Structure formats: structure tokens, C-alpha cells
């Protein structure tokens, strides 16, 4: 099976020829892989020793190595086509949904629908874990929709507003 | 002498566990209290007895004086240790315990009142040789009056909670235009954290270092300091990394500041363990910041350089014992560094993260101590502080202690939530931190989220190969077992497709 | 100076992990080697590189000089640390490394030969001021000649492996009638453990204490001792519990024994870390027992009372550095105790146990250090030594260190095999141990299996109630899920009916 | 359900009236029990806190509390009858099967079939984990059968000989 693996802006063509035999950009890589506890693995590639964790969250895959988390995108040939189409689609998107980074209480909303916001501007204050946390806009644009009100409790990842 | 036989620990998390450990060392029985979410917590497991506080949030549980006194009565505890945070600096709690005939392990209610309230403390110290930063005499609630005073003191100013501590409710204001917003949000945070919205205003020192002195005083008038802790690495005005001793203090300065700290303790008739915090400016002038009338989060670094157990000293003092040593008997041995492990995402502005901890494996070996209250399967919830544990290392010198910290951080496994571990790794390897020459602006001056990323191309390629093969393994195993849950080697359960619960 | 960049650790288990930790502190890369059963071991996971030794038993793997030298060549390691046991006292190994241009972290092959062979060492020391116990000059293989010499020395006698250490091959003979059987079994054990069946005979001291001195010597003629370790608590002539300092040594005796230990090191032109073992009789006379030309299992207690990292010192010495301190710069600070956690059943004559470790949770907190090589799911097999980990505590005095050990032992969770943990709990609480006045017969004099049982009737009743309810819980959960494996709370997997694999 | 629970020579009549409600020798005991990891539980009985492990090995149940292992015999009424009959049976038994306490190599056999042995006498030496381990007879009697020979490898729990 041929895969495209994206990690840290690197794109690698990997070809799994058999279990634990991989071709990386054309050259063969043998790997000694053993599962440990939870989602952790120990891998020996050549003599190099790596312990890492693989997990999946909201459909995305992540690899954790020595407390560093790498998003890991693994696409087979069919996925690549779909992903390419999505990419084209995405480039025409100019809006951003602002999601709650944690469960909490909306303590203040600092913008109004129709207002213009700058990238990095604080648009809402979310009170959680006994602290006031500033939620900032990731893009510049117009506030097209506010889905919450002040003093409202929100769940993690619920949409707070849309910019653009 | 009043020998304590059973201590109720009015706290949770790592500090409750840490206090229970010393009680066990001393042969003292322990009682844990717990909120509903903490039933499985380590402090409940480790204590000899445990009493439910029947509630979820801290305002329904760990902050309710009556429930805690009732639990002490139920179990026949003859003393209460408040830990830090929660009711630890609440004079009413100390009084309620004393009225119930229970020893409060901490200073008198009177000392707590004098020093716990930051404005009262400032008034008390005015005219002594303890240097104070310019600021308001009293706490202030009128917005326009506050704004006028801020202009008088001169921007930048600091708005601080009178009842405060731990950076909660603190706001820096550079621009008068931001004053109103900052004051309101400081008052809100203070109300939530301490049930007291009073704030006061102080001159904000540029590029200060935060250096504090540990104090111990018995009930017979003997007071010593256990040297300083350097706590300048902060985010959101809260400490993340501490060390002892500080790399900037000369022996002369150490002596001067230590004497000032002892004076603060004496003026408030202090007994027990306490901490006098100072700000040190770039010219090495120091100013009294506040006194914390309780055990500090970062007390282990002092324990490692002095060989003393501060909780044991607190208990001995509460029993009425003499300190048994004088200032001249104390010396600094080696160097200690502490990293606080928070469930926070350093690549996303240190926003707190929540979720279940799947795997928690702590480093051990030479020079490493971990104080932790978390175990596999436990939830980091929105209800409490996101601190998971404290990692502390010691060596005969600072360089060695930092090296051991780098090793311990790398060894530390915590899966399920984002943590400050990679941030701490960044700090330990940073030349400015290693030089010892930094201030409280270290994070804003030197840290960007991309700094915690790894850029070794061979490593990245190998991780990609390994990761793909691991995913392949999951797919293969899932196919043969035809189930979401894959049991391997009859010893471990592995399940990629289980979505991490947040 | 020959800066070491990459160390191959020719060992396994806790000591391999411990050495890797110090290498990481020093920024030195590490290479692990492993037998097939050790693929998932902690030392393989923690090292930067790992090389399979393709075999199962130690005779096929960790004892094969050629395989280890080849692994060092393959990975470009410029030094080898042998740990303890295996090839650590093998002069041929030290020579093979040197010939391959690889630094051997340990003494010269010549010193190993002189001191590693117990009979050569005795001959070398004869006539010096180092006191020797009466015994044979040479190793001996002829049975009737041996028996004659034994009668000459006078029963009881000790038969010991010439190439020995760690109590392996050692036999006490009280009755001439048992001599033959003991000598044969000693020879057998010596052959298996060291590949060398030579034995010698020594006078057996009654009620001796085992006290040893840690030596450090650089390659420039500077030798110091790091004080003593008390190692009298032994079963099967193997240490289980050690401490530093010893509670019987006066400063004068410490100085005298320390000087004798330094003389032993100087006579063999020793450099590196080594240990000179003495027996001390009830009149506090001391006799040279043997020198171990390697790091000792119990080295952490010395690290805790001196603040030195012995592995770091070994590496520095191997690099050709000067010690940098003299005897007068060294002082004892506080007290340290070590308990070895063995997979052995103390209620069944300390018979080794084997099986899978289901759950391994180590204690942490003030004054506790754990050196361990095991993790959840790993197997304790028949192929290797049954030592799982070492638990070490420190405090400012002996009483405190023992209290902390009691706490740490209670906190230690190891499930799947029987361990020496309850035995160590028994010793720590025993008045004779606490008094400090005991000898190597402590176990036979004071320990019976029933002593480790708990006799609190309320506790027993509550455990019965709790246990029954837990079994009820399993039955209920199994019914509803209709499966052998019960997943609870979506976080943990619980399965009573899984038979423990042995 | 009524049970007889035997632990440490104590016999307790326990009656589980509902989940987490037990009657102990007639008086009611309420218990707060939560499962932890592996086979561990946390129990609160009154205010007393206990963490313990339950496991089963070769059909026997054990409870582990602070590193102390207690055999735990739980019998319902039907079991009690069976167990009583077994007990009667056992009392007429005067033989003991000597099992290998660990896998290893039989290095020496110190008795012969038909020989008389004392309780505690070493009857066989088993080499395992690089040590010679003495296997002793738990009873006095006559060696009725030897099932192994010297230099034979044996598995854990395999029968070595029978005394009586």
C-alpha cells in the first residue's frame, strides 16, 4: 500500500511492502516495532530507539515523542484525491468558526455582529478554571454571527461565533 | 507539648498527598476530604480515613468551613493542615478550627489577617526597614478614584487582589485607557478566587525578578529564614519554574533580604512556615511584595537545599516544639530546580486543557523528586487548578540540577492532556535561563510556541516511518480481532480508535 | 583528556537504566544491548540506540564479549560501562574493549585480576596492615586436601568462589560431615555464575557485621573513600537491606577502616569506583573480606549521604579527569537506607518467584529514590537475577530515613509476583533493626514467615467485607457484559478471572 | 446471597443484601467501593479508606493489601456443602504431592523411592535463577513415587514426587 505521510511540513512517500517493511521515498527501511502499554510503541530503526504514542482525536491522528506532539497526516491514494479537492475548496473559504477552547462561562463578548475585527484581537472572554481567558480571532474579518450570550455556559469545542 | 495524633488535610491533589506522606513518616493518622469528582484521587486512597464533602465545585466542598470542621469532628482529628490555596489563608477557618478545639497547622488568625490582607501588611511595614514599592495605602473599589491614584503613582501600574496570592486577579496596566477593563476583570477574578473582590494598586516595576524567602518561626519567638527561592519564570503572573538558591544574590544581599524577611515575620508575631516575597529590580534593589502565610507550592526546592521537611517543621511548630536550630546552623547545600506540570497548552497561549490522563509515568533515579496527586484514568476537570504535579531535581550545582531536570522532563510520560512539559524543556535548554540572568518577562521576551517544536530531519523521517507502521499495526490487529479494542500480548490493551475524551 | 561521547551499557535492568540516566545528564549518547526477552525493557526504551544480542540466556547474550564489542563497533560507541554482575569483573572483557580502542569504564584489567580473584587479593595483602581472616592461601579443587585445610583452620568455615561476589557459590560449613556436599554445590554454583569453579576456604566469623567502604581513585594517584555502607541484613549471603553510615562505627574506627580500604586500592594500583568489604566481629575487630572492582548494587546510599553521583565520577575518572577533592573535603550528611525489591517469596524461604508484573507504581515524595528497570507488563523470568528494583530513602537522621522507608514501602505497588516488600516492612519496624545493633544472622535469628502477617481484627473484617463486595462487583459486571473482560468507566480494564500467568 | 468468607483464620458470615450493602454476622455494613486500575479497588467502610487488589490464581482467590497477600475463601451455601465434603476427604489424605516452586533444572535428588523422610527435610535440589534451591518435604512419610530424574528440566508446578 502506498501512503503519503505528512509530519512537520515534511511530506514522505511511504510504501508498506510487508508488515514492518517500508519503502521511504524509494529506499527500503526495516523497522522493529513492538506495542507497549496504552497507545505507545517502541521502534528500532537501524539501531536508533524511539518510544512514541499514537492517538486519534476528532478524526485527526497525532504522534507524541518525548512530550512533543506532531500532527500526523496519513493518506492513501484515494485519500489524496479527496484531500486535494478539499484543499481547493478550503482556499476559497475566508471565514473562521471560533470554538470554545475549553468548557466555561462566557464572561464578556467584546464585539458585535457586523463589527470588523483584526487578526489576534480579543473578541470574547471565557471564564474557566478560575481564570479569565481571552479568546482571540485567528483571522481579520467581519463578525458574521454570534452564537452565544454573556453568562452562558459553553461546552468545549462549541461554536461561539463566526468571523468572515 | 500537645502531640498531634490525627490530621485532617483540608486540601486535594499533590499537596494533600505530600502532607499525608509526612504524617505517615511521623506516625500521625490522616483524614482526607474529597469532592465527588475526587473520590478516586490519590489523597483519598492514601489517607487512613476519608470523608466526602458532598459536592462538585470548590465553593461547595473544599471552601466550606463548616463541612471541613464537621469532618474533623466525625473522625476525631485533633489538627487540620490547610495546604495552600482554598482555606489556607482564611483567618475565619483558623478561628473555627481553634474554637472547635482543633489545632490549626499554620499561623494565628491574627497573623493571617495582618499579612493575608496585602493592604494591611503594607500599612504595618510602613516605617520599618523593609522596603516597599510605591502604591495605594488601602484597597480601593471606586473606579475613578482608583484611576486618579494610578496616574499619581505613574504608569505602568499593577492592580492586585487585596486577599490575593498566586497571581490571581493580578493585572498590569500600561495605558490609562485600559485601566477600567483591567480593574473590572481583576475584581471579578478576585471575587471568584478568594470570595473577596477588593483590589489595590502598586507601582509596576520593569523587568523585576521575583525572589522570595522561606521563613520558619516557632511559638517561642525563634525565627529563621531558609534562604531564597528564585521564581521569575512566570506566565499569567503565576510561577511555572522555581529554583533555590537564586543565581543573582550575593551572600551580603542574601543576608540583608533574609533579615528583612525575618522582620516581616516578627512584626506580625508570625509562627509556622511562611514566605516573604520580594521584587528585585535590575539594579538589585528589592521591594516587599507580599507575605504568604502558608506552605508554598515551590517549598520542595528549599527542602532539597536545606535537608529539612517543611511539613514536618510545620507540625512540630504547631505542637509547640522549639525550632531547635538557629540561623547560623543553616547552610545551603547544592542547587534545586522545580518545574510545575500544568494541564495547559504552551503552544496555545498556555490555555488550560482538560481531559482524562491515560498514562502517567513519573521519572525517578538520582536527584529526582516528584510530588503528584494524579494517577492513570483520573480526570483533569474545569473545577480545579490545572496543576498536575511538580518535578524537582537536585544536584551539587545549578548546572547539574538543570541537566537532571532535562533528563527527568524527557522521561516524564503524561498522555491525555497537553502539558507544560515541552515548555519546561525549552526553558531548561535556553541559554538565557542557563546563564541565570533573566527576569519575570522571560516568557514574553524569549518564548514563541514554535520554539518547542523539534527540527531534526532524521528524527522526523524516522518518526513518520514508525508512526505509519504503528497505524498499520492497528489496522491489521483490528481486522483480525474485528473489534475496536485490541488486546495485545494478553497484558496490555491498546486502542487507537478510542477518541480521547475531553 | 579523552571526552567520552557515546557509552554502550553492557548490562540490563535497573543498573542499565541508572547508568543511562547519568549519561543523559552529561549529554553522552547511550547504546543499550538486549537479550530477546528484554526487547521491551526500560533500558532499551531509554537508550538512544539499542542492539540485539540475539539470544535468550545470559550465557548467549550479556556474557558474550564478542557480541558486546561488535555492538559497540556497530554503533561507534567510544566507551563501555559494564554495570555490576555479568562481565563487570572480567579482565578479558576490559582487555578486549581496550584492544578495540574503546574506553572501559572501570579499573585496569590488571587491577581486576589482582582483586577480582579473591585468593590473589589475599596473597597481595598479606604482610600489609590490612587485617585478613584466617584461610587458604590458594584456591583449591582437591576435596580431601580441602577438607584437611578446613579442619586446620577450624570449623565453622566458609567455602567461597575465588571468582565470586554477591554471595554466589558461598557455603558455611559447621560440621565436617557436610563439607563434601557443600563444596560440590559451591563449585557448581560458581561455575554457573562466573564460568569458574575455583573455590577457597576461610574461617567463618560468628555473628559478624558486613561493613564495606566505597573507594574512588583517579588515574593520577588520588584515592579517597566515601565512607562505609552497613550491609548486614542478608539472606542466602546476599544483601537485602543496606544503609549508610553504619550505626556502630565510631569516627576513629571509620578513619582506621577507611585508611585500610585506601591501602587495598593503592596496592592494586586501583582507579575508578570500587568497594572494599570487611567483616566486623562482635568486639569490633575488622577483617578484609574482598574487593569488588565495580559499581555496587547499593551505591545509591553513598550517593545520598555524599551528594556525589558515582556513575558520573566513574565516567570522569575514565576520561582521565582529576578527582578534584581530597578526603578532608568529604563529609557524611544525614542517613540513607536501601531496600532491594526481589521477586522472591519471603514466606516461602525467599524462593524466587517468576511471572508477569501487572502493575508497578513506585513511591515518590520527600526523601525517596527508586532505581528500577521494570514496567507494567514485563516478565520476571528464570533467566536473570530476580531483583526488580531498589528503593532508597534519605533523611537528616537514621530514624527519619527508616520512617520514610516504612512509608515508601507501604506506598510501593507491585502486583503479579511475590516480593521482598513485606519482609522489608518487617525489618524496618523491628526493634533490633531500629536499635542498630544487629549482625548478618538477623534473618535467621529474628524472622519467621508468620511475622509478616497482619493481625488487626478490625482490618481483617473490613478487608473481608471489601473483598466480598469486590468479588460481587466482578460477578455483576461479568453478567451484564457477558464476557471475561470487564471494561469499567471506559478508562480501566479490570478482569478478575484472568489467571495470573506464572 | 449468603456467604461464608474465610480470611486469616477468621470466618465471617456475610449476607449481601443489595449491591454495596452487606450484613456482617448480623449487623449491617455499608461500603463505598470503586474499581481502580487492574484488579484494584478503593473501599471506604465508615470513614476508613482501603486500597486492595483481588486476584485469582489456579482457582484460588487472593486479596492484597499494602503488599500483604491474604488467601480469601468465599463460599456460598452450596459451596459450603461441597467444601465440607472435601474437608472430610482431605483429613483422610496423608500424602503430599511435591510441586516445582519455579521452572528449573533438577540438579540433585536426595531421596529414593521407598525412603523415609522427615518434615522439613531437603528432598531435592532445583537449580533456577542461577541458584541452587532446596525443596523440602512438607510432611513426614515415605517417598511413594519420584516423577523426575536428575538433569531434567521441569515447569513450574509440575509434580516432582509424592510423599506418603
Image (cartoon, coloured by chain):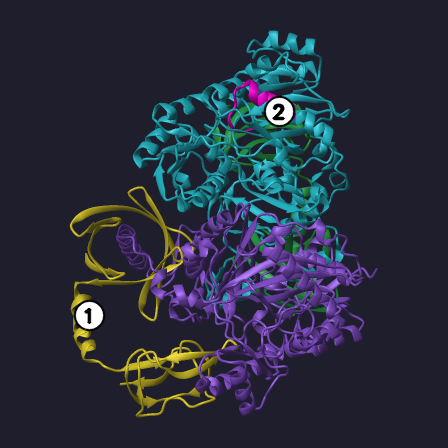
Chain colours: A green, B cyan, C purple, D yellow
Image position of D19 (left or right of C167): left
Quarter of the image for the N terminus of chain B: give it: top left
Viewer-side residue, A137 vs B428: B428
Q: Which mark is residue D83?
A: 1
Q: Give how far apart the Cα atoms at labels 2 and 1 are.
A: 73 Å
Query: For numbered disc 1, what is the local secondary structure?
Result: helix
Report the residue at 52% width, 40% height from top.
B354
Residue numbers of the magenta segment:
B259-274
Task: Give SS at disc 2.
Answer: helix
Q: Give percent across and percent down for residue D45.
A: 29, 46
Would you say C461 lies left or right of C388 here? Answer: left
Crowding at dot 2, Cα within 10 Å, few <14 / some 14-19 / many 20+, comes out as many
* Label pair 2/1, CB-CB below 8 angstroms: no
Work out which residue is located at the far right of the displayed protein and give it.
C1
- Picture quarter containing residue B474? bottom right
- Residue B24, labelled with which disc? none
Residue B417 in sight from this viewpoint: yes
Amino acid at each position: 500500500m502506498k501512503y503519503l505521510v505528512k509530519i512537520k511540513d515534511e511530506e514522505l512517500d511511504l510504501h508498506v511492502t510487508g508488515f514492518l517493511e517500508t519503502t521511504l521515498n524509494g529506499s527500503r527501511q526495516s523497522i522493529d516495532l513492538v506495542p507497549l502499554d496504552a497507545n505507545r510503541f517502541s521502534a528500532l530503526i537501524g539501531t536508533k530507539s524511539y518510544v512514541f504514542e499514537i492517538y486519534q482525536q476528532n478524526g485527526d491522528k497525532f504522534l507524541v515523542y518525548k512530550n512533543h506532539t506532531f500532527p500526523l497526516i496519513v493518506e492513501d491514494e484515494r485519500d489524496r484525491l479527496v484531500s486535494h479537492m478539499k484543499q481547493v475548496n478550503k482556499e476559497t473559504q475566508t471565514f473562521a468558526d471560533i470554538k470554545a477552547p475549553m468548557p466555561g462561562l462566557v464572561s464578556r463578548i467584546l464585539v458585535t455582529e457586523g463589527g470588523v475585527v483584526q487578526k489576534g484581537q480579543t473578541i470574547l472572554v471565557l471564564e474557566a478554571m478560575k481564570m479569565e481567558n481571552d479568546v482571540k480571532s485567528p483571522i481579520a474579518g467581519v463578525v458574521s454571527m454570534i452564537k452565544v450570550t454573556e453568562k452562558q455556559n459553553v461546552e468545549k469545542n462549541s461554536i461561539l461565533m463566526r468571523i468572515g | 507539648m500537645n502531640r498531634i495524633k490525627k490530621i485532617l488535610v483540608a486540601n486535594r491533589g499533590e499537596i494533600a498527598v505530600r502532607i499525608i506522606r509526612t504524617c505517615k513518616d511521623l506516625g500521625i493518622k490522616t483524614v482526607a476530604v474529597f469532592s465527588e469528582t475526587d473520590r478516586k484521587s490519590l489523597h483519598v486512597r492514601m489517607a487512613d480515613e476519608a470523608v466526602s464533602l458532598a459536592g462538585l465545585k470548590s465553593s461547595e466542598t473544599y471552601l466550606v468551613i463548616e463541612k471541613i470542621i464537621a469532618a474533623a469532628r466525625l473522625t476525631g482529628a485533633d489538627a487540620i493542615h490547610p495546604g495552600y490555596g482554598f482555606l489556607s489563608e482564611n483567618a475565619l477557618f483558623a478561628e473555627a478550627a481553634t474554637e472547635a478545639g482543633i489545632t490549626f497547622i499554620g499561623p494565628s488568625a491574627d497573623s493571617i489577617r495582618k499579612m493575608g490582607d496585602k493592604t494591611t501588611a503594607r500599612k504595618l511595614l510602613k516605617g520599618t526597614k523593609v522596603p516597599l514599592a510605591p502604591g495605594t495605602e488601602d484597597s480601593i473599589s471606586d473606579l475613578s478614584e482608583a484611576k486618579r491614584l494610578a496616574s499619581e503613582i505613574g504608569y505602568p501600574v499593577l492592580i492586585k487582589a487585596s486577599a490575593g496570592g498566586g497571581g490571581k486577579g493580578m493585572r498590569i496596566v500600561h495605558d490609562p485607557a485600559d485601566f477600567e477593563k483591567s480593574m473590572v476583570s481583576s475584581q471579578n477574578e478576585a471575587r471568584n478566587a478568594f470570595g473577596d473582590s477588593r483590589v489595590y494598586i502598586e507601582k509596576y516595576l520593569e523587568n523585576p525578578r521575583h525572589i522570595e524567602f522561606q521563613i520558619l518561626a516557632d511559638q517561642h519567638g525563634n525565627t529563621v529564614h531558609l534562604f531564597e527561592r528564585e521564581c521569575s519564570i512566570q506566565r499569567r503572573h503565576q510561577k511555572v519554574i522555581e529554583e533555590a538558591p537564586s543565581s543573582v544574590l550575593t551572600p551580603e544581599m542574601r543576608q540583608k533580604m533574609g533579615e528583612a524577611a525575618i522582620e516581616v515575620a516578627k512584626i506580625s508575631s508570625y509562627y509556622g512556615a511562611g514566605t516573604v516575597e520580594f521584587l528585585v529590580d535590575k539594579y538589585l534593589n528589592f521591594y516587599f511584595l507580599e507575605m504568604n502565610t502558608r506552605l508554598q507550592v515551590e517549598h520542595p526546592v528549599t527542602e532539597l537545599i536545606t535537608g529539612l521537611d517543611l511539613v514536618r517543621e510545620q507540625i512540630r511548630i504547631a505542637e509547640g516544639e522549639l525550632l531547635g536550630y538557629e540561623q547560623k546552623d543553616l547552610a545551603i547545600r547544592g542547587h534545586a530546580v522545580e518545574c510545575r506540570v500544568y494541564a495547559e497548552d504552551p503552544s496555545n497561549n498556555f490555555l488550560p486543557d482538560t481531559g482524562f490522563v491515560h498514562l502517567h509515568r513519573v521519572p525517578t533515579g538520582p536527584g529526582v523528586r516528584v510530588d503528584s496527586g494524579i494517577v492513570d484514568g483520573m480526570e483533569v476537570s474545569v473545577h480545579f487548578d490545572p496543576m498536575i504535579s511538580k518535578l524537582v531535581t537536585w544536584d551539587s550545582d545549578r548546572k547539574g540540577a538543570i541537566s537532571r531536570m532535562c533528563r527527568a522532563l524527557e522521561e516524564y510520560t503524561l498522555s491525555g492532556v497537553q502539558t507544560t512539559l515541552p515548555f519546561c524543556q525549552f526553558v531548561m535548554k535556553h541559554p538565557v535561563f542557563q546563564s541565570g540572568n533573566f527576569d519575570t518577562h522571560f516568557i514574553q521576551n524569549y518564548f514563541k510556541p514554535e520554539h518547542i517544536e523539534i527540527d531534526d530531519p532524521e528524527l522526523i523521517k524516522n518518526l513518520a516511518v514508525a508512526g505509519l507502521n504503528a497505524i498499520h499495526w492497528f489496522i491489521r490487529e483490528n481486522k483480525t480481532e474485528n473489534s475496536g479494542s485490541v488486546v495485545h500480548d494478553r497484558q496490555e490493551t491498546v486502542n487507537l480508535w478510542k477518541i480521547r475524551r475531553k
